[in-house]
Amino acid sequence: MKPGFFISLLLHSTAVFGGIFLFSGKIMPTVEGRVIPVEMITVAELTNIRAAVKAKKPEDIKVPADPMALEIPMENAPEVAPEEVTAETPAPEPPKEKTPEKKVVETPEELPTEPEVVEKPADTAEAIPEPPKDKPDEKPEPPAFSLDALDALVDKSRQTQPEANQQMALVSETNRYEFAESARAGSGAQDDLTLSELDALQSKMYKCWRMSVDAKNPEDLVVQVRVKLSVDGQVQDAKLTDRAGIYASGDPYLKVAAERALRAVSKCAPYDFLPADKYDTWKDLTLNFRPEA
Amino acid sequence: MKNLTTKFIASFALICGLWGAAVLPASAQLEIDITKGNIDPLPIAVPEFITSDARIQQIGADMADVIRQDLERSGLFDSLSPDSFIEKQTNIDYQPDFANWRVIKAEALVSGRIIMESENRLQVEFRLWDVFGGKQLSGLRLATTPDNWRRIAHKVSDAIYESLTGEKGYFDSRVVYIDETGPKTDRRKRLAIMDQDGANSQYLLSGSRTVLTPRFSPNSQTITFMSYESIVPQIYVLDIETGRRELLGDFPGMTFAPRFSPDGNTLIMSMIVKGNSDIYSMDLRSRSTKRLTFEPAIDVSASYAPDGKNIVFNSDRGGSPQLYVMEANGSNAKRISFGKGRYSAPVWSPRGDKIAFVKSQNGKFSIGVMNPDGSGERILTESWLDEGPTWSPNGRVILFSRETRGRAGKNEVWSIDLTGKNLRKLPTPGNASDPAWSPSLP
């Protein structure tokens, strides 16, 4: 026990002090590499989109070549004629008639199969020996089972009629942004301004905002303005977030920078280039005027 | 027991609820960084100052003209032509119709009025309006004698400049320069003074002594200069207001390149003793001198920082003329210029953030600026011979003398601002060189 303890002590201290000696000069601070500035940008056009359904193409309204030709002869009383005209002119009616017709055609096709199934139990009830006959008949069929047959069972409606099951928008609704050229899955609420919309705002601001480059410390002159906009892009209110702080700082450059920021906001109005359907997003804007050298 | 379980579940639910509330974004507000803006000159409208007195109507028009020129020359403003004005002002006590000024793209509007209070007292009022903000930015009332209207106009320009840039104006200031007459081989160099815009030029000293390197005291209307009155050039101090002139001491060697300290109580200069030029400081009250550099090299052209703690100077101790910064007591000299070429005539900006210098390279001379630590060197001008930079009182504009080549070459005074884009020639009656910009007038 005792010698073991001392051996352990000796070995441990050797390891510790040896380690200190061996690695004394080798622990270097991590070398600072070149810092690559990374700017995070959201490509909201691609990453933050709301699910949309395919917009319906405006239907061609079939207008009779000569609407008057369809009319009932004008011999009728003039009072009656207008009523009939209004009643008959709705062109969309014919398509409505067609679709029911299709359904009518389809259902009869299906119907015959059902009666057969119903009849079979009757057949089996009458003649018992028949089932064995049926079975041999059925046996050859399984060998006939092929992938083609299976394939035929697969619902191909997606390929043959890709648009059949799609949710369609009403023509009147196609202007709304939930409806697009083709249907797409959503991956966000689409409540961000897209990069190009931000670019439009920033390039407009470039023209309106005079930077304080002549000041001694232009990078420090950061001014935050809260802007309330109306739907048509007019400035309802523009306030400095830290008005008291700016005026209390006693820094004349900062005061001028604040005035320049406010002037830029009112000079750039109206902001009618911002998309009206995202009004909820930009009705309340916070603009950070942050001069870059 | 059941009660305890219920309590536990309730508190757990509460905590979860609070946590959820904290995590939910509080009405997501869009925040956008605007990092790029333009640096175009600000369009400003200065209609003539209105007056009901026919005798001073001309002064009203002339004042507006001087203000327009002041602002335009600064490079930071675009003075709109009065021909474009839609609204004619009749009273400055009401808000102008901003829409009329927005149409002509004016961002600021100056409306002024002059009243002749008595035979020799003129009262000038003005208001500066923010056309897009729709509010008054500044308003002043000034009084003076009618013949002093130019200075009042410069003061108005200063007030406009300050409220729109945050920087003190420099228009109410003067420039001392060397007026040169005669051919290059036999020049007469006399001390003269003018307003910063070139108006009211006049000689400061009678006689025909050759005078060089005038320098202003940073806080009073006193200049120091070098005169060849005796065989050996000596340093004088001259009070411009009183005309009192004083020779500074009897030095053992040739003294040159004098310059005031920021408080005006110390003069720093170069003196050649036994063929070696070094920098000395002289207390103007006790007249005691102190040697600051002890190198066998040529140390010249010293200039104080505005806080008086450091001195920038020119030395060839490293082989070629370069700029060095040392502490005011002469210790801790550090080289700050490392570019190609030869550096000379450093001058510390009154704002403290830049040092102007002359750089010669490839047979051309340039005026440039750099930060006091030597970084951010920028060349602002280049010509056959640019020299003698001097700062405007606000440290934004530099005056310098430019000499053109050849026997018929001219000496002119030019100005350049810190952007390097606004190069202008100052109108002087004849050849002029070695300008020295005064501090703002009181």
Image (cartoon, coloured by chain):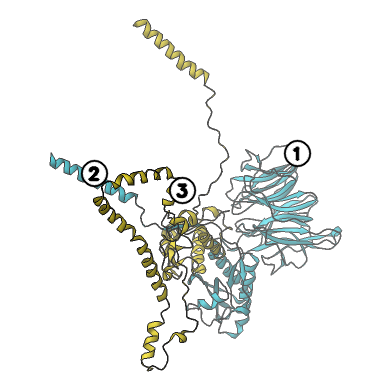
**As rendered, which of A64 and A133 lies closer to the eye?**
A133
What chain is tagged by disc 3?
Answer: A
Marks 2 and 1, how far apart at CA? 79 Å
Chain drawn cyan in the picture: B
Marks 2 and 3, how far apart at CA? 59 Å
**As rendered, which of B176 and A263 lies closer to the eye?**
A263
Residue A257 lies, with reference to residue A82, above or below; the image says above
**As rendered, which of B130 and A135 lies closer to the eye?**
A135
Q: Which residue is at 42% across, 90% downward?
A: A73
The kind of secondary structure element at disc 2 is helix
Give the image location of residue B261, x and y in percent: 62, 50
Residue at mark 2: B12
Q: Which residue is at 60% across, 77% downward?
A: B146
Quick check: can you spot residue B12? yes
Q: Colour of chain A?
A: yellow
What chain is tagged by disc 1?
Answer: B
The reply, left or right, for residue B310 in relation to residue B22 is right
Q: Are marks 2 and 1 in contact (CB under 8 Å)?
A: no
The kind of secondary structure element at disc 1 is loop
Q: Which mark is residue A226?
A: none
Residue B359 lies, with reference to residue B77, above or below; the image says above
Residue at mark 1: B319
The reply, left or right, for residue A51 in relation to residue B337 is left
Q: Are marks 2 and 3 in contact (CB under 8 Å)?
A: no
Residue A272 lies, with reference to residue A6, above or below; the image says below
Residue at mark 3: A148
Q: Amino acid at mark 2?
A: Phe
Q: Are marks 1 and 3 on the same chain?
A: no
The reply, left or right, for residue B289 in relation to residue B11 is right
Q: Amino acid at mark 1?
A: Gly
The residue mark sitting in front, 2 or 1, is: 2
